[in-house]
Image (cartoon, rainbow, N blue to C red):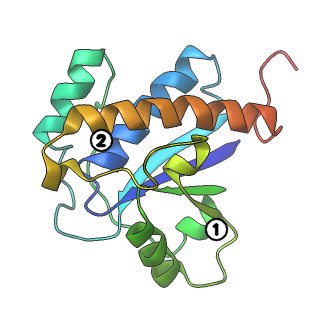
Amino acid sequence: MYRVLFVCLGNICRSPMAEAVFRDRVEKAGLTGSIEIDSCGTGDWHLGKPPHEGTRRILDGQGISYEGMLARGIRADDGERFDLLVAMDESNVKAIREALGIEAKAEIVRFLSFVPGARLADVPDPYYTGDFEETYALISEASDRLLAHLLESGKVKTNLG
């Protein structure tokens, strides 16, 4: 089982959207039993709350489930429990490193690093921009690219082989 954790600031906009979209892609690829997916935030403002209304609206419009998702903070053991920590922006990368220290075994990457030639390095936070559509478009493409990367690199095996 390969474990992926999506990380943003508050865990109500970008990372739960990424968790839901990536889970949807994984399910459609028939890889549910091969990849564990979760999300968290580096801040504690929204702990226990469901995804932001804008995130829910976008996911509803795409027919993507977010059932049972509640915001949580990053935990000390996340660096050991997960193989890949996917940050939405550079400030998330720094916060992850501060929270987990140098001992973490997990690889830490920015989400848009999986999109060759991406016009942005970071996924903009729609909590501040209000543009949930742009966030969804970026997350959707990056999710496709991440899944392709995991399969091509052999980190995740298809059920066929």
Q: Considering depth in this image, is 21 or 120 the residue closer to the camera? A: 120
> What x and y, as percent, mark residue 67?
28, 30
| Quadrant the C terminus occupies | top right
> What x and y, as percent, mark residue 29?
62, 17
Instruction: Find numbered disc 2 in the image and state the secondary structure of the residue it sits on.
Output: loop
Residue denoted by label 1: 80
Q: Considering depth in this image, is 60 or 32 the residue closer to the camera? A: 60
Q: Residue furthest right?
A: 161
Instruction: Find numbered disc 1 in the image and state the secondary structure of the residue it sits on.
Output: helix
Q: Residue at x 18, y 40 (%)?
A: 131
- Disc 2 marks which amino acid? Met
Whether residue 59 is situated above or below residue 131 in the rendered picture: above
Circle 2 packing at 10 Å, graded few (<14), some (14-19), many (20+), is some
Whether residue 113 is situated above or below residue 105 in the rendered picture: above
First reached walking from the N terminus: tag 1 or tag 2 = 2
Mark 1–mark 2 Cα distance, whole angstroms, equals: 22 Å
Q: Residue at x 57, y 42 (%)?
A: 117
